[in-house]
Image (cartoon, rainbow, N blue to C red):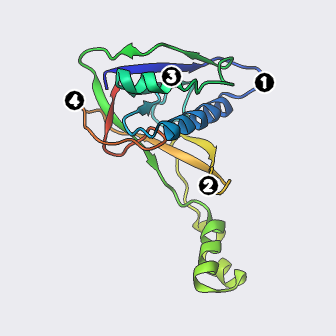
Amino acid sequence: MDRYIDLKLRPDPEFPQTLLMNALLAKLHRALHDLRRNDIGISFPEVGQNARNLGAHLRVHGSAQALSGLQALDWLVGMRDHVEASDALVVPDRVKHRAVSRVQVDSSPERARRRLIKRHGISEEEARERIPDSAGKRCDLPFATLRSKGNGEVFRLFVRQGPLLDQAQQGAFSGYGLSGTATVPWF
């Protein structure tokens, strides 16, 4: 990972920053899926401790070849008025690294009840007794709200930026540009 592209959301009086970041991440996910690459990662340079949103700055990391393939897709169609995108730039020397990963939280008691009803054939009332609304888990990580292409459901993609490391860790990235093991340069 010796190159990166900076994508910065422009202020927009009509659309909140979080909505624009959600749209940008959805477009990136579709592009990564179309490319079928697992060597492009992302980070959110503006996200600090206790942040609830991902900020207005997305950094896409990869090799020159990987990022060239991404840009060849022209995946920013429809977002160009909202995003300032750099060319593929060289990562500075002597930077730290960190893993940027997805954290899945089973936060919906309703979904858990539906699963219980389907798997065990019990009534909705019995499922509600077994899994009360208070059973929902909360997560304080920043997130994007996306829609699944598979089933059309809206879900939260919680993102954890791991501790800073002196050395890069190799590995594969998901279709969202996230990995629990592989790191991206942090600067």
Residue at image mark 2: 150
Q: Is residue 171 left or right of residue 30?
A: left
Judge the density around disc 1: few (<14), some (14-19), many (≥20) Cα neighbours within 10 Å.
few
Please report the residue visible at 54 percent of the width from the left and 34 percent of the height from the top: 31
Q: CA distance from mark 4 to mark 3?
A: 29 Å
Q: CA distance from mark 3 to mark 2?
A: 25 Å
Residue at image mark 3: 71
Mark 2 or 4, nearer chain start: 2
Mark 4 or 3, nearer chain start: 3
Tell me, yes or no, whether the two marked residues, 2 and 1, touch with CB atoms within 8 Å: no
Q: CA distance from mark 2 to mark 4?
A: 38 Å
Judge the density around disc 4: few (<14), some (14-19), many (≥20) Cα neighbours within 10 Å.
few
Tell me, yes or no, whether the two marked residues, 3 and 2, touch with CB atoms within 8 Å: no
Quadrant assignment for the N terminus: top left
Residue mark closest to the camera, 2 vs 4: 2
Residue at image mark 4: 166
Q: Is residue 44 left or right of residue 147?
A: left
Residue mark closest to the camera, 1 vs 3: 3
Judge the density around disc 3: few (<14), some (14-19), many (≥20) Cα neighbours within 10 Å.
some
Element marked by disc 2: loop
Q: CA distance from mark 1 to mark 3?
A: 27 Å
